[in-house]
Amino acid sequence: MEANEQTPVQPKASPPRAFLPLTPMGAAAFTQASFTRLWVVQFIFALLISVVLTWFLATAWFPQVTKAVQQLPETGKIDDGKLVWSEPSPQILSENRFLALVVDLTHSGQARSTAHVQLEFGATDLVVFSIFGNCTFPYPPGFEMMFNRPELVPWWGAWAPPILALATLGGILALMCSWFLLGTLYWGPAWIFAFFCNRDLSWSGAWRVAQVSLLPGGVFLGVAILLYGLGILDLLQLLLAWALHFLIGWLFLGASVLAGPRQTGIPTKGNPFKA
């Protein structure tokens, strides 16, 4: 009697564990990951980038606001759309290479700063100067705001930390929303590219890989903000980095799709009509 021989069943290879989408293979692993894992990884990256942005505000902008508040006179306020100011004008309250705060009631142009952004308080409006030009914001009618040292110093000291915390949360929310929208926009092109490259990529997998492919560009932009805050990059170079981070997302998306598995059962070599 012949013994029945059974062929051992080979265990199915498990998909690679999705963890760090900073390489094409790492991003391709997220095609099989859960949506929860995707959102957790996106949140961690958004938190790190937002911390860099908050650090920049805390070291480059907020100290200048503190100094400007301490330079205000004993009396002054914005009342019914007009700035009540008794000190000489124009006057630079504080400035560094990033931010300048100026009082120029007539916007005479005699207090222009070399800072990348200048906030100039006029008699009836606030003008913001930057590399993009200037933008005017009139004081709203009926609007009242203290504009003197005795009242603004304690107010700013109490509210500066919560404002930084809100900036961090706002940065996280803005990054998560932008990645969701851009990833959804890249979703269709990613699936079409995978189809013509004979890659085994489902619709849901294409959406996930489109989402995580944006993270390396976000890290690149976060590093650029850090270098800008350290004085290594200037404003034009920072703007160039902001534009490049979109290109990085597209290039990384294409590389991540190509790093995915090929479709099985599709001949790639030889004559398909040959016996």
Image (cartoon, helix red, strand yellow):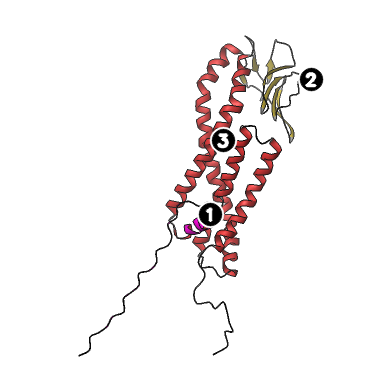
Compare marks 1 and 2 and give the one earlier in the sequence: 1
> In the visual, does 1 lie left or right of 112?
left
Q: Which numbered mark, 1 or 2, is in the foreground of this view?
A: 1
Instruction: Kindly identify the residue that appears in the image at 31 percent across and 79 percent down.
Output: 7
> In the visual, does 145 lie left or right of 4?
right
Q: Which residue is mark 2?
A: 110
Q: Which quarter of the figure is the C terminus placed in?
A: bottom right
Q: Which residue is mark 3?
A: 53
Q: Which residue is mark 1?
A: 23
Q: Which numbered mark, 3 or 2, is in the foreground of this view?
A: 3
Specify the segment rendered in magenta.
5-29
Q: Is residue 45 magenta?
A: no
Relative image position of residue 59 (x, y in whole percent) = 58, 27
Compare marks 3 and 2 and give the one earlier in the sequence: 3
Q: Is residue 19 magenta?
A: yes
Tag 1's secondary structure?
Answer: loop
Instruction: Kindly identify the residue that appears in the image at 68 percent across and 24 percent down.
Output: 100
Tag 3's secondary structure?
Answer: helix
Magenta span main SS: loop
The part of the image, by quadrant, that contains residue 74 is: top right
Instruction: Kindly identify the residue that appears in the image at 52 percent across and 19 percent down.
Output: 157
Measured Cα–Cα span from mark 1 to mark 2:
52 Å
The amino acid at mark 2 is Gln
For mark 1, does the 10 Å Cα neighbourhood hold few (<14), some (14 to 19), or many (20 or more) residues? some
Relative image position of residue 70 (x, y in whole percent) = 60, 14
Instruction: Kindly identify the residue that appears in the image at 38 percent across and 69 percent down.
Output: 12
The amino acid at mark 1 is Thr
> In the visual, does 82 lie left or right of 199?
right
